[in-house]
């Protein structure tokens, strides 16, 4: 059996869950569901990043301990995953005692083999970023993310010999052109590495809210090193067995482009140092923009996923995310754009296809899928080609391309109704077998749409199968069932409420 391991980044607990978190989580869920439909052994991980300065400061303001603070915040992120129907197998928190232990073991191992050393360091430090900046990376002498002037601080820090992994990293990039998708991000990451790598500080002396360095309790592990290790540590304790041999290396780490550098340079070097294989692919998605700008609370241009899901349902939101903006690129989203996709594509094209098919089978065939006089070769071949195209796109995490191919099929079925005009056939007894053929083809086409669409719109997909007289079990949803000619004549077809009701 193939295994498939997909991750989201762990989300910083201090944040308010927004469309960006929902986007990455849904993308990972689409891949996880797709691979389960293939019959793969799947592990899907998400969770929260809970250490570091912002959480400690927020706790201080409220007069509670950092642990109390993060315990109170984590629920929002668990709720987000549930709300978008994410089927994550585990939710990791970096304050889990098992994670803490795993991080300590990991860096102790690197320290013992000489990859970590102590150095006195003076640098420009942004406390909000918890990062040192080189002069050249500042904007007008200020942190590019926070717009505040960094402090010049001097402390003893533990350094990781990142520079000594440069050659091996370059070699890895050369041998694995599929390490990072899309290709533009691969090139960007490779050029970081080619520019030359300096050793990085992996501990902080001025912070208390973190995982203590095991051999020097006066320092804590740099929050990014702590966070990156979640992808491995979770496998060791998510279930009662150690899943590392079964699921590592990860097949896909999904993330937005702002954290590419950590995942493309530091993470693989840490893994090399500890003797782990590198993840197979990183997929870097873009930003969903409002009016050409990155959404942010302070700009007040937030498209709130919760409002959309409350009004239109989870599936509509999941669909829109990958339909409107090509996954992997930046793109503009808007409420108008959402409503237009909802009405045109979900309500009219897919919803009406189901309603019309069920109504015609009800009216012309007593609510049962009629036996087709023959199997239609052009449909069988078309569906086979579609299946191959979707499989290829999904293997590259090209979610938008996969969805577009499926949608072309939805449209072709609508056109088939218009072209064949079953209502005319129904008025002529001599055309009975033609009519049966059309009705069978529509039911079969819809069943295949439901299977292929299930990773994206799972509630609607299951409902389509139920209306077609199937149980919508995992067996019914298997990708291998997205093949022409499987529907048994005689299945009861139910007519029901619109799949996506039109809303004004
Ligand atoms: Zn900063």
Image (cartoon, rainbow, N blue to C red):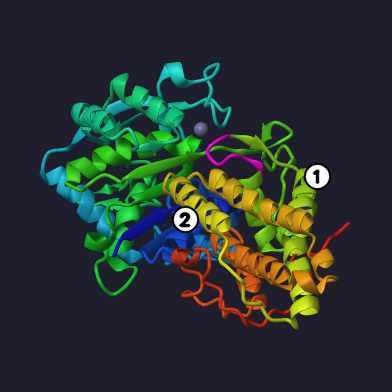
Q: Nearer the viewer, residue 462 or 182?
A: 462
Q: Residues within 10 Å of mark 1 (few under 14, many from 20)?
A: few
Seen at 55% across and 59% down, the residue is 452
Q: Nearer the viewer, residue 215 or 347?
A: 347
Residue occupied by mark 2: 31
Q: CA distance from mark 2 to mark 1?
A: 28 Å
The relative height of residue 339 versus residue 174 in the rendered view (above or below) is below
N-terminal of the pair, mark 2 or mark 1, is 2
Q: In the image, which disc is placed on residue 336?
A: 1
- Residue 401 coordinates in the image, percent (x, y): 55, 43
- Residue 203 coordinates in the image, percent (x, y): 30, 41
- Residue 4 coordinates in the image, percent (x, y): 35, 58
* Quadrant (top left/top right/bottom left/bottom right) for the C terminus: bottom right
Q: In the current view of this chain or complex, which residue is farthest to the right?
A: 504
Res 197 visible:
yes
- Whether residue 328 appears in magenta in the rendering, the answer is yes
- Viewed as shown, does residue 356 lie left or right of 173? right
Q: Nearer the viewer, residue 279 or 145?
A: 279
């Amino acid at each position: 059996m193939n295994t498939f391991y997909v991750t989201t980044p762990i989300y910083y607990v201090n944040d308010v869950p927004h469309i960006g978190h929902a986007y990455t989580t849904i993308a990972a869920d689409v891949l996880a569901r797709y691979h389960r439909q293939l019959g793969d052994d799947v592990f899907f991980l998400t969770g929260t990043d809970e250490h570091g300065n912002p959480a400690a400061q927020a706790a201080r303001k409220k007069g509670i301990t950092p642990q109390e603070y993060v315990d109170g915040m984590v629920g929002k992120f668990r709720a987000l995953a549930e709300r978008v129907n994410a089927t994550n197998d585990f939710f990791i928190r970096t304050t889990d005692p098992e994670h803490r232990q795993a991080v300590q073991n990991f860096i102790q191992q690197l320290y013992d083999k000489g990859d970590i050393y102590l150095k006195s360091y003076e640098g420009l430090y942004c406390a909000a970023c918890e990062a040192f900046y080189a002069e050249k990376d500042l904007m007008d002498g200020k942190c590019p993310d926070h717009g505040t002037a960094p402090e010049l601080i001097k402390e003893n820090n533990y350094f990781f010999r990142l520079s000594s992994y440069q050659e091996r990293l370059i070699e890895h990039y050369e041998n694995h052109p599929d390490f990072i998708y899309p290709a533009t991000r691969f090139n960007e990451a490779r050029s970081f590495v080619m520019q030359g790598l300096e050793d990085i500080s992996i501990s902080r002396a001025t912070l208390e809210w973190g995982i203590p360095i095991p051999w020097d309790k006066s320092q804590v592990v740099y929050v990014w090193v702590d966070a990156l290790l979640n992808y491995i540590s979770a496998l060791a304790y998510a279930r009662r067995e150690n899943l590392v041999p079964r699921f590592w290396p990860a097949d896909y780490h999904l993330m937005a482009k702002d954290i590419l550098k950590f995942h493309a340079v530091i993470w693989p070097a840490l893994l090399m140092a500890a003797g782990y294989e590198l993840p197979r692919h990183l997929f870097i998605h873009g930003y969903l923009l409002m009016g050409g700008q990155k959404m942010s609370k302070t700009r007040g241009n937030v498209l709130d996923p919760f409002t959309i899901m409350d009004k239109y349902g989870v599936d509509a939101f999941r669909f829109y995310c990958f339909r409107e903006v090509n996954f992997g690129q930046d793109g503009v989203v808007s409420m108008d754009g959402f409503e237009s996709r909802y009405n045109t594509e979900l309500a009219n094209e897919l919803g009406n296809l189901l309603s019309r098919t069920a109504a015609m089978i009800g009216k012309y065939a007593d609510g049962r899928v009629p036996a087709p006089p023959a199997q239609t070769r052009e449909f069988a071949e078309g569906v086979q080609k579609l299946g191959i195209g979707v499989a290829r796109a999904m293997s590259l995490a090209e979610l938008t391309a996969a969805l577009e191919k499926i949608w072309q099929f939805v449209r072709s079925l609508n056109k088939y109704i218009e072209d064949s005009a079953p209502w005319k056939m129904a008025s002529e007894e001599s055309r009975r077998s033609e009519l049966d053929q059309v009705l069978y083809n529509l039911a079969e086409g819809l069943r295949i749409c439901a299977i292929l669409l299930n990773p994206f719109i799972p509630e609607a997909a299951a409902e389509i199968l139920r209306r077609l007289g199937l149980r919508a079990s995992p067996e019914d949803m298997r990708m291998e069932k997205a093949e022409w000619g499987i529907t048994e004549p005689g299945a009861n077809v139910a007519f029901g409420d619109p799949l996506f009701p039109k809303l004004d």
